[in-house]
Image (cartoon, rainbow, N blue to C red):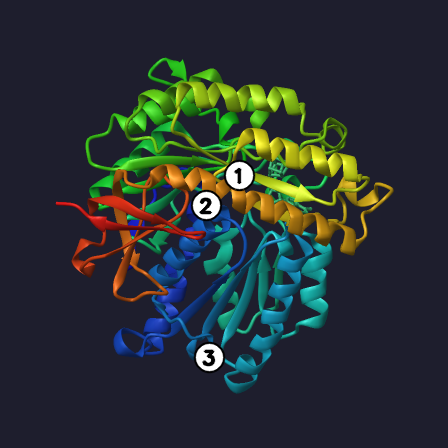
Amino acid sequence: MAEQYIESAVTDPETAEHLSRIAAVRDRLKAAGRVGDAAPKYFIQTFGCQQNEADSERLAGLCAAMGYVKTDRPEDAELILVNTCAVREHAEKKALSIIGNYKHIKDKNPAAVIGVGGCMVTQKARADKLKGSYPYVSFTFDTGAVDRVPALLDAALAGGRREFVLSEEWKIAEGIPIRRASKHMAWLSIMYGCNNFCSYCIVPYVRGRERSRSAEAILDEARALIDDGARDITLLGQNVNSYDGGPYDGRRVDIADLLHRISALEGDFRLRFMTSHPKDASDRLIEAMATEDKVVKHFHLPVQAGSDEILRRMNRKYTAEKYLETAEKIRAAVPDVSLTSDIIVGFPGETEEDFEATLAMMRVARYDMVYSFIYSPRAGTPAAAMPDQVPREVASARMERLLALGAEIADERNARFLGRTLRVLVEDVSKNEPDKLTARGDPVRPIHFAGPPSLIGQFVHVRITEAKTYCLEGEVVE
Ligand code: 5AD
Ligand code: SF4
């Protein structure tokens, strides 16, 4: 189900100017009789993280506001937008290959417009590549230029020059319409960008420096979302622990304040946040999780590696010991917490001993889930130029060992839910078992159980009867 919702008042004149071009496209479609049943269709392909999913909901909001209707079939679309990721080479390759396939669509329907946005095309070399080798791509727009899509589309429809937008500064564009993929679960961006410059990571280069949205804009959006039926809200940012919303009601608002203030809003909903940088996970944030019933007891605290030498070269600014202190603090305050992590395998110079320190970290931290990645060199980041890049076979073999240990620990952790009755939000019909529903709650794994689709969007009590590798099975209790 898709719901449309307008984020907040437009405050910035430049964004207002960009968004005014929505009307230009709408008028163009109207003049051509492309309204109602004859309205053209849009298709959005999204790669990457939740931040990109949230941006794609803005792109969908813009498409709908301009008079396009959604299709799940790119071959039926007259507007294709690809929202790319750059965090690993694999993501870029996949995006380029899909964009390559869209050539057939453009060949069949020369009127179709193809635009590419996101982290990949925020790198000049990639934007240039699309410009040079993908002539059927009409425009690219960087991560700070989502609000420019109507103008880019209007120009493309008018047969103007191809445009490749690389913003000089990244601001916060309030007021972009949002079409959310789910009515019950919502991403709520609270900040953009990252200042941490972990040596392997492209994000600070493609998402710019940290900027926090005002507490007022976030609270307004949260209130509107809840009124609109959202029951599970995730506060999003690359490092939500350094959220700084400036003064509100006489004091500076940090992430802990935000959790308290949003929790205080009327309504039956749950609140999550991600991602936390371990160096900034404050006692106040931990306390907010411990004391606010609406805050889900799940802490995503990416460790990345267990060896102090690797952590130093990753520029993570903590040691394994310091990390574990924070994890212990969280466990002491929230005993039932689900702790999850991101881990990189095969960082340059990683020795067998370093890798074993990562495994040791996993054994002590006891993660409910680990998202693990083989290190991928990103041009322009310091790590890409470091000596002793780890051969692919070595990294793959280590990855297998890490996955096996991760699964073993996760299974043990998940077993604690067996026999318990949990209050969970019914998300949807289960993809693999259509006679079942899928829900989410405090466990990181989805919860599957038999029930009618009329329960979708509601909280129900489910008794957990089985803990599987990828999900928990249960039954509804009255
Ligand atoms: N190679 C592999 N994994 C990476 N990540 C970020 N950059 C890279 C890279 N160059 C991982 C980190 C981060 C997650 C979102 O992606 O673990 O937390
Ligand atoms: Fe990348 Fe590090 Fe910023 Fe996370 S904190 S987005 S890993 S630079």
Q: Residues within 10 Å of mark 1 (few under 14, many from 20)?
A: some
For the residue marked with disc 3, what is the amino acid? Glu
| Residue 350 appearing in the image | no
Q: Which residue is mark 1?
A: 171
Q: Nearer the viewer, mark 2 or mark 1?
A: 1
Query: In the figure, residue 332 lies in which quadrant?
Result: top left
Q: Position of residue 348 (x, y in %)?
A: 79, 42
Q: Position of residue 222 (x, y in %)?
A: 30, 37
Whether residue 376 sits left or right of residue 254 in the image: it is right
Left/right of residue 443 with respect to residue 49 in the rendered view: left
Separation of residues labelled 2 and 3 (CA atoms): 31 Å
Q: Which residue is mark 3?
A: 75
Neighbor class of circle 2 (other Cα within 10 Å; few <14, some 14-19, many 20+) is many
- The reply to whether residue 54 is visible in this rendering is yes
Q: From the viewer's perspective, is 408 left or right of 297?
A: right
- Which of marks 1 and 2 precedes in the sequence? 2
The kind of residue on which mark 1 rests is: Lys
Q: CA distance from mark 3 to mark 1?
A: 34 Å
Question: What whole-number distance in Å separates the C-alpha atoms at marks 2 and 1?
Answer: 10 Å
In the image, farthest residue toward the top: 250
Q: Is 5 above or below relative to 274? A: below
**Residue sitting nearer the eye, 13 or 194:** 194
The one nearer the camera, 234 or 350, is 350
According to the picture, the residue beneath numbered tag 2 turns out to be 15
Direction right: furthest residue: 387
Q: Earlier in the sequence, mark 3 or mark 1?
A: 3
Question: Which of the pair 454/180 is nearer the observer?
Answer: 454
52 above or below 265?
below
